[in-house]
Amino acid sequence: MILIKNVKILGDKESNVLIEGNKISSINGEIDKSDIVIDGKDKALIPGLMNCHTHAAMVLFRSYAEDMYLHEWLEKKIWPAERKLDEKAVYYGTKLACIEMLKSGCTFFNDMYFYAEAIAKAVEDTGIRACISSAFFDFFDKDLLEKNIKRVERDVKALKKYERVLPAVGPHAVYTVSLEGLRMAKEIADEYNAFIHFHLAETEREVVEFKKKHGKSIVSALDEIGFLCDKLICAHSVWLDENEIELLSKRGVNVAHCPTSNMKLCVGKALNYSLMRKYNVNVTLGTDGAASNNNLDMFEEMKFASLLQKFYYNDPTIVKAREIFDMTTSNPAKAFKLKVGEIKEGYLADLVLIDLKKPYMIPGHDFISDLVYSANSSCVDTVIVDGKVLVENGKFESEEEVYEKVREIAFKLVE
């Protein structure tokens, strides 16, 4: 049992929170004894933040390919380097990403990358929670599709054995996967009750070329093949019109907004949050990979999400701090059907203690606003995932060993 005593839940009045097993068992209930007691004085308790779109092992390419156009960045730098990846590289890259996320208050991430079991082992070894999608491309080649779809099915089966892992299928995008490949991906997801992780309408080029080839919008085509559903998480979703947004809503599709990556790679528009709110689309936040961000700090992502909306649409009232906070907590919980994202009895104990004595949290007029606009990863004191303390006093055990290993691997990949 873990007792967090005298802690301010979401910055409000002091409470005692008891964790038994991997769940919150009581708030201000009677307490006889606890194995671990955490003093919550001058700290606030929040639900763990959730990163809903990333390619974790891409921390290996952090600062490697900078100041380039998206398609040039992918085709000339990232894809050639990724061809040198192996299980070891993905394991250590993901492990570093997990440590970075945990130390910045993130307790769950939604990943799309290669070597799915290597990712799962890094998740297992660090204690974080994740949805892992086995990424695949077919480049409109039937033989490649057949080969990769078999591998994806094997990966989804294998991921089922990991305790804190939700399995997913990860068809990359419409410019790298055929409609037949997407249809088959949905069939696998249905068969194994898995999620689908997908890039949608990130750039104007993607949308224009698809319409020229197929004579219809991407969203319409996806709907025709039965791809749209409530277990689909669509990253980016920037170049969409109102009809497409309404259709996503009707099908229960979830969106992962990645403002930092979108700004850095200059995708040309900002996600239309107002329309998504109008049609009740479930919007979440993600960092994207560290090769295009360049970090995995969800505090930073919250701030940029709000500022991008205000600046692009010239309206300081367009989105409230609480809505942004929900995009990293309760909205992802809904998307991934997890009992997290709120501090309530019976919910999973994925929790973060924020140090209220950090200068960024003072004087403290509005706690949620401070989290969204002022806080950063240095404000994270303690992180608990699945009822286990993983970060104490801002430190993760044996992180230095991982740093050295990643440096050694990363430079070989880009030689």
Image (cartoon, rainbow, N blue to C red):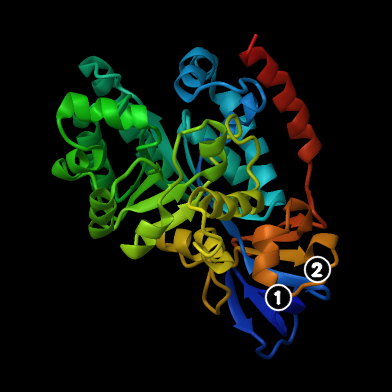
In the image shown, does 315 or 34 lie closer to the viewer?
A: 315
Q: Quadrant of residue 358?
A: bottom right
Looking at the image, the residue that sits furthest to the front is 314
Please determine whether, in this image, residue 143 is positioned above or below residue 240.
above
The residue located at (53%, 44%) in the rendering is 259
Q: Secondary structure beneath disc 2?
A: loop
Relative image position of residue 63 (x, y in whole percent): 67, 25
Relative image position of residue 367 (x, y in whole percent): 69, 71
Q: Secondary structure beneath disc 1?
A: loop
Task: Say if residue 36 shows up in the picture.
Answer: no
In the image shown, does 328 or 209 lie closer to the viewer?
A: 209
Residue linked to disc 1: 11
Name the image quarter holding the C terminus.
top right
Query: Does residue 229 appear to the left or right of 266 in the view shown?
Result: left
- Marker disc for residue 356: 2
Please determine whether, in this image, residue 111 is positioned above or below residue 304.
above
In the image shown, does 187 or 202 lie closer to the viewer?
A: 202
Q: Amino acid at mark 1?
A: Gly
- Marker disc for residue 173: none
Distance between mark 1 and mark 2 Cα atoms: 9 Å
The residue located at (31%, 25%) in the rendering is 175
The residue located at (48%, 20%) in the rendering is 74
Query: Does residue 143 appear to the left or right of 239 in the view shown?
Result: left
Please determine whether, in this image, residue 71 is positioned above or below residue 16.
above
- Is the Cβ of the residue at disc 1 closer than 8 Å to that at disc 2? yes
